[in-house]
Image (cartoon, rainbow, N blue to C red):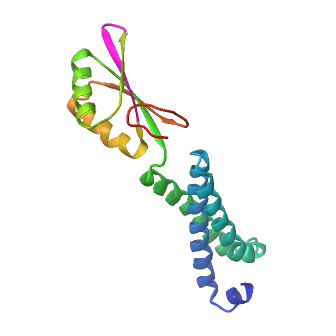
């Protein structure tokens, strides 16, 4: 690999290093997210790909990075771009499961329940008391990719008059419409 890099123009080497680093770090970001979400086999496959890219390309030039500041700059740009692309890609894929906790008055609770039933979403409602009034808490567990559109529609239906807490779920078992 080092013979190949020595045979091409130094600017082209900079772009190759940058592109390889972007791919490597993007893969690394996705691998980390998959490990956290318990998708170990997919994470291991991505880890193999990441290691292969690093072993074939990056390790070939690592010894010269300190001597060539232009190459170092491209390496750093590739790293930063890879982090950005990896996190952007993961948010688009939306791996995992979300937990939505909605707090609403009786009228909005009925609206939310009707929407959830219409869309075959499981939910649990608890009666509660807010600082000034009776409130209800509606718990919803759903695929993460569905959380944003669901919240957007609920907020629209309730004229933004609902308090929302969203978090990620690492483990769950059972529940209406939930298989795991």
Q: Is residue 3 visible?
A: yes
Please check the rendered image and state whether residue 63 is part of the magenta-colored stretch, yes or no.
no
Looking at the image, which residue sits at the far right?
A: 63
Asked if the stretch drawn in magenta spans residue 137, the answer is: yes
Q: Is residue 89 left or right of residue 125?
A: right
Q: Which residue is at 32% across, 36% downward? A: 151
Span shown in magenta:
131-141
Q: Position of residue 92 (x, y in %)?
A: 42, 54
- Near-viewer residue (37 or 77): 37
x, y percent for residue 123: 36, 27
Q: Residue at x 57, y 60 (%)?
A: 80
Tell me: 146 left or right of 5: left
Q: What main secondary structure does the magenta stretch of the protein show?
A: strand
User: Between residues 180 and 164, which one lies in front from this camera angle?
Assistant: 180
Measured along the vertical axis of the image, is residue 7 above or below residue 101? below
Q: Give above or below for 5 relative to 24.
A: below
């Amino acid at each position: 690999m080092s013979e190949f890099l020595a045979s091409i123009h130094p600017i082209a080497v900079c772009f190759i290093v940058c592109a390889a680093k972007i791919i490597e770090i993007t893969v690394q970001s996705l691998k980390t997210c998959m490990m956290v979400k318990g998708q170990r086999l997919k994470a291991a496959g991505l880890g193999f790909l990441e290691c292969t890219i690093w072993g074939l390309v990056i390790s070939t030039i690592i010894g010269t990075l300190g001597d060539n500041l232009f190459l170092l700059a491209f390496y750093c740009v590739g790293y930063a771009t890879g982090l950005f692309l990896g996190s952007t890609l993961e948010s688009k894929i939306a791996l995992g499961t979300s937990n939505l906790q909605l707090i609403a008055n009786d009228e909005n609770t009925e609206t939310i329940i009707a929407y959830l039933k219409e869309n075959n979403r499981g939910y649990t409602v608890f009666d509660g008391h807010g600082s000034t009034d009776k409130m209800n808490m509606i718990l919803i567990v759903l695929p993460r990719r569905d959380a944003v559109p669901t919240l957007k529609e609920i907020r629209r239906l309730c004229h933004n008059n609902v308090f929302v807490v969203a978090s990620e779920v690492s483990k769950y078992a059972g529940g209406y419409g939930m298989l795991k």
